[in-house]
């Protein structure tokens, strides 16, 4: 049997005394190195902790354990307004049971002292608070789990003839909502969409998770037929196509009169406009756009209430 006397907070005043029985009576005592390897039944000057004593009667030996506590150490209570938050949110940490408090690590904390502090971590983190009452102290820890926000992104691949394959490149997403810009939508992660008319479409992807949503958008230039376009009484083609910026527009129409030629880039910006008179049923109109950057352009021809277009590629490589 071992009787202990607890230490005074912050000191080494504890004692442990062994009482041996049922042996030969010629007992020897050896405390572990943490107790200073004392060799009497009574060990003194002990700080808070666990100590081991070996007792030997010359025939057998036994090992006993003594636990020295610290009288006066604060008993802490630690809580959080939420243990799981989203990135960007603030959590309030509250400690009680001591007179003074010190928090660590200081990362994302509003203060490192006080019984109440705010934290706005951007990743999962464990905070430790140390409470003191005079020379006495004790510590407690709490973990705050931070869930990330979704980030939207996507790529696409033109398979030809209006078929576009979309690939989600988002992070932290659990749902996907696509708007293809032509009135059609989908909610699968990696859709393939068929456009029925060539043109410039603004495609949007909205991704969500439990923490919110994010949106990514791109302008997609869809080319179903970039050689020639025909609309009842009008036909239009560009030759050569692709070209280096210098090419001919071939326009056929039963109508004569004023026509307006507009050229738009991939983002729908007008880069050229020209008004002229159509005097024959078939015309070859020379075009020189060598001053503009290479890329895909949409050429429209307006004649009265009739509008026709063709997509043309400038490539100087």
Image (cartoon, grey):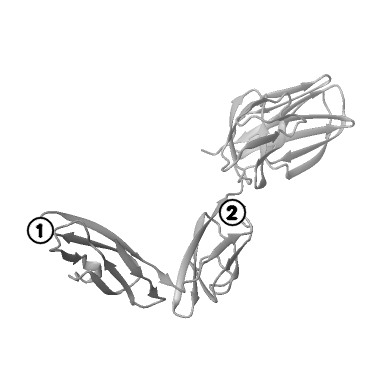
Q: Nearer the viewer, residue 152 or 11?
A: 11
Picture residue at 79% right of the left edge, 33% below the top: 301
Residue 262 shows in the view:
yes
Count the marks. 2
**Outermost residue toward the bottom?**
134
Picture residue at 10% right of the left edge, 54% below the top: 59
Q: Secondary structure at mark 2?
A: loop
Q: Secondary structure at mark 1?
A: loop
- Name the disc covering residue 242, or none: none
Find residue 143 and report its horizontal and vertical position in percent. Answer: 52, 56
Q: Nearer the viewer, residue 61 or 108?
A: 61
Report the residue marked by disc 2. Answer: 83
Residue 286 shows in the view:
no
CA neighbours of label 1 inside 10 A, class few (<14), some (14 to 19), many (20+): few
Find residue 42 and report its horizontal and vertical position in percent. Answer: 25, 71
Judge from the rendering whether residue 76 lies leftward or rightward of residue 12; answer left or right: right
Find residue 177 and report its horizontal and vertical position in percent. Answer: 69, 35
Picture residue at 58% right of the left edge, 68% below the top: 96
**Outermost residue toward the top?**
232
Report the residue marked by disc 1. Answer: 58
Q: Is 181 situated above or below 159?
A: below
Which of the 4 image quadrants contains residue 56?
Answer: bottom left
């Amino acid at each position: 049997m071992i009787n202990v006397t607890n230490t005074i907070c912050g000191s080494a005043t504890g004692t442990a005394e062994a009482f041996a029985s049922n042996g030969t009576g010629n007992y020897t005592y050896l405390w572990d190195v943490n107790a200073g390897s004392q060799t009497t039944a009574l060990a003194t000057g002990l700080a808070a902790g666990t100590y081991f004593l070996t007792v030997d009667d010359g025939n057998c030996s036994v090992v006993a354990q003594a636990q020295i506590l610290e009288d006066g150490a604060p008993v802490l209570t630690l809580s959080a307004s939420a243990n799981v938050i989203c990135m960007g949110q603030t959590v309030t940490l509250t400690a009680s049971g001591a007179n003074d408090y010190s928090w660590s690590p200081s990362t994302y904390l509003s203060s490192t002292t006080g019984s109440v502090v705010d934290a706005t971590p951007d990743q999962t983190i464990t905070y430790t608070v140390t409470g003191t009452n005079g020379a006495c102290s004790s510590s407690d820890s709490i973990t705050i789990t931070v869930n990330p926000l979704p980030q939207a992104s996507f790529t696409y691949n033109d398979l030809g003839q209006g078929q576009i394959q979309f690939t989600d490149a988002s992070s932290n997403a659990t749902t996907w909502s696509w708007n293809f810009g032509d009135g059609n939508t989908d909610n699968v992660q990696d859709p393939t969409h068929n456009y029925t008319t060539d043109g410039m479409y603004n495609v949007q992807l909205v991704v969500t998770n439990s923490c919110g949503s994010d949106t990514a958008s791109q302008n997609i230039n869809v080319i179903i037929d970039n050689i020639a376009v025909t609309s009842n009484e009008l036909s239009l083609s560009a030759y050569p196509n692709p070209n280096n910026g210098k090419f001919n527009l071939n326009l056929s129409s039963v109508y004569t009169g004023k026509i307006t030629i507009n050229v738009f880039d991939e983002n729908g910006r007008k880069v050229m406009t020209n008004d002229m008179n159509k005097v024959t049923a078939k015309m070859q109109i020379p075009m020189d756009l060598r001053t503009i950057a290479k890329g895909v352009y949409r050429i429209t021809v307006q004649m009265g209430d009739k509008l026709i277009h063709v997509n043309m590629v400038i490539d100087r490589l």
